[in-house]
Image (cartoon, coloured by chain):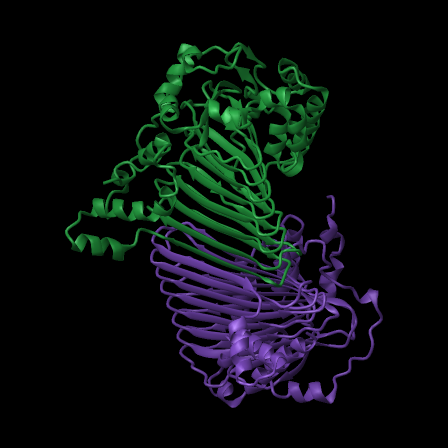
Amino acid sequence: MIKDKFMRQMTPTMIKDAVFEDEPEWMTEFRVNAFEQMASLDLPKFDKMDYHAWRFISHPSQHPATKTEITDAVQAEIDKYEIATVGSRTVRSQPNDEMVDNDVICCDFQSAFQNYPELIKPYLMQNEQMQKDRLNCLESSLTNNGIFIYVPQNVKLTMPIKVFMAENNFKAASTFSRVIVVADEGSKFDVVQKLSSVGDQKKVTHVNIEVHAKANSNVQFFSLDSIGASNTAFVMRHARVDKRAKMNWMIGSFNDSNTISDIATDLVGEGSSGNTRIVSIANHSQQQGINTRITNYGRHSDGEISQRGAILDRAKIVFNGVGKVAHGAHGANNQQENSVLMLSDEASGDANPILLIDENDVIAGHKASIGKIDERQLYYLMSRGIKPEIAKKLVIRGFLGIILSHIPSQSIKAQMINIIEGKLAND
Amino acid sequence: MTDIAEVLPDKDYEFGFHDDVKPVFSTGEGLNEDIIRQISKEKNEPEWMLEYRLNSYHTYLKIEDPPFGPDLSGMDLDHMKYYQKSTDKKYRDWNDVPEKIKETFDRIGVPEAERKYLAGSSAQYESESVYHHMKDELDKQGIIFTDTDTALQKYPELFKKWFGKLIKPTNNKFAALNGAVWSGGTFIYVPKGVVVSAPIQTYFRINAANSGQFERTLIIVDEHAHLEYVEGCTAPTYNSDSLHAAVVEVNVLPHAYCRYTTIQNWSNNVYSLETKRAQALEDAVMEWVDGNLGSKVTMKYPSVYLNGRGAKGTMLSIAVAGNNIKSDTGAQMIHNAPDTSSSIISKSIAKDGGSVDYRGKVRFAKNSPGSHCHVECDTIIMDDQSTSDTIPYNEIYNSDVSMEHEAKVSKISEEQLYYLMSRGITEQKATEMIIMSFIEPFTKELPMEYAVELNRLISFEMEGSIG
């Protein structure tokens, strides 16, 4: 077979390196199957994003590993989370009391294979059907870091489940992380996630997150993406939402790395709903491709997307918002809004709101706007005696603030504000 | 719910008849280099044009079908007739046009419209223009209005200066094919400061089965001049498919104005794959008014390259896709200069299993500070079998610009229906009223007073929905 550029980066021995200690046979088989399918599948197509020539994996042979250093500051942060991984190593697994009392499972894949093999298996295997493409097969076959969260029927948590995942840039080999979140029927909870990195060796990092929101469940998933500049990051998020369940994504995409980020929600069940909000800043010569999709399959399902981005320096953001309504989704609603703020003449941005409608009994709409900072808002603030630089920052912070007020973790909220300030400081 | 068929009836296509005019010259089926040489020789063209054609042909062979949009694999390009000439001469007096061709155009209503309102009109039948007429006073003002082949012979320098400057054969497969086998089309030059007070019209008609029509239109509106141009298209209904692959280039020079109105109403066996591009220089205004009512597959994304400071571009379009029609149309506004502005308003209706897509692009290039764009796309999907995609790309390379884009897809508003019906209006009548008000922004821009026939086409498609 003629190997294309992507396939030339792959060898079957990679699976051996990825396999978990004592992993069940079915898992290894699943990896091999996924690996074999890669050659015949295409990379997912995201409009206007030309990432096919990017690297998709980095090998241990490329750089010698150095000692992994977890600074006190990072350690102190890790201690605030229920579960934390650095590279493919689990460094903390301490569910809070509420989770323990309610039999909530939150552990790495290794423990899940030991303790709940039958529970995790169907969800692990489902990934493939959810997204049949080359990237997903790659991430399925080479998973070397995993977190499994299961919230039982009718459990309603008041405290968020906090997850920390850092790529280990002291080592050269790519981390392929997977997170599987299962919200069983009638459950309700928040997940707060932080993606980051330690060290500064160049590498490719993958994070693949799936949420299964079963009937009548209610999941809010917050994420602060702050992966370091030495990475190329692929962050894939998919949710499957059953009858009358609610699934909200709230994402601050503040990676310093070149990033492809895909957030897809399938509203499968009747009366299901999904809301995706994402804010992003790109600076330096960074490229971010952010693709958000909500598909209505269920009758009377309701989807909403808001995307906001600020672009500085020579950076580029491509925002695609895809609202898709499948035939038969009577009474579906699908709305989206994209706004891009251009903060530099050398920056470039795309805002592509796309509607794909195969059903007539729908209301679907999108809005996109692109522009500079609102002069009237600036003027208003300055007329109150606020200095121009500060007024400008306030306006931008307000623009990106649509998710800030919803974040249930003070620490994450504060960090998000710091990152926004930090990125704007270069301006 | 009203039976939609009553409101937008799937009536027989009014212009589906054909006559048995035998071409006086035809290159037969298929295409190769020899055929291109024959066409060029038959037209007695200069060497550079033959080279241009061959070059385009080689480009055509290398380009694939577009990677987006409707499936084109059903077209039988090997058995298509690429060049057919129906008369040996072009006529200036309607009475001299051969009887059968005249009857055809009479039935479509071309001469009637001309007599009443138009400053000039032209008719193309298959590959060649058969009739051309312009009012004498326009002649005296130095306006050139002729078919494109004649322009190449009579105004070689002007022609060469502008031909192919906006659209290269490499633009897409069908622009390349047009470059290879182009024939006919309209050439208009409006001299500096001349205002053409009434519209000029060309009518395109395909008659034979399995035909390709590759008209090439080139318009130059010189500084401070003013032009309104109208084109209409029909074809007979056959079981086999025909192809209409036009290339249209419009140059609007500083401070000039051009409005280009198209009413495309091909029969549902025509693939209409067109490449239309305009450039607007300093303070110039270019307006596309585009109605797509027929054909089997339409792919058309007219563009305005806003190349001069203060230039304006607008697109106002409606598309109606009925049974098995795939309409994939849109607009492109490319802001290449400071203080340019553009607007796109697109209204689409899908019914009886049709699919109507909007595909557009707005780009603000590096040197476009102070520019603005506004886009609105509205779609009504009338029934459970029909679909619609809205795919607008917005690319921004400058921070001092602004744009808004809005789109909406829905069925006929039940609230509006309910409101009207609560006033004692029947459901059918209420549906008609809602549809007519939906497309009103378009219909009110049509030159009602003079191009009677265009309105007839619209009202034909919408018949039953007009009170």
Which residue is nearer to you in this view: B466 or B118?
A: B118
Q: Residue at x 48, y 14 (%)?
A: B91
Which chain wears green? B
Q: Evaluate whether residue B122 shows in this view.
A: no
Q: Residue at x 66, y 66 (%)?
A: A344
Residue A228: give x, y in percent of width and height: 71, 73
Drawing shade for chain A = purple
| Vertical placement of residue B66 versus A379, above or below | above
Residue nearest the viewer, comparing A44 with B344: B344
**Residue beneath the point at 33% across and 32% down:** B456
Q: Is residue A163 above or below residue A19?
A: below
Q: Name which residue lies at 45% across and 35% down.
A: B262
B192 on left or right of B411: right
Give the quadrant of residue A145: bottom right
In percent of width and height, residue B328 lies at 48, 41
Q: Position of residue B397 (x, y in %)?
A: 64, 58
Q: Is residue A322 above or below residue A272?
A: above
Is there any visible trace of residue B302 in the rendered image? yes
Quadrant of residue B28 within the rendered picture: top right
Coordinates of residue B226 in the picture (x, y in percent): 51, 38
Q: Nearer the viewer, residue B230 or B10?
A: B230
Q: Quadrant of residue B29?
A: top right
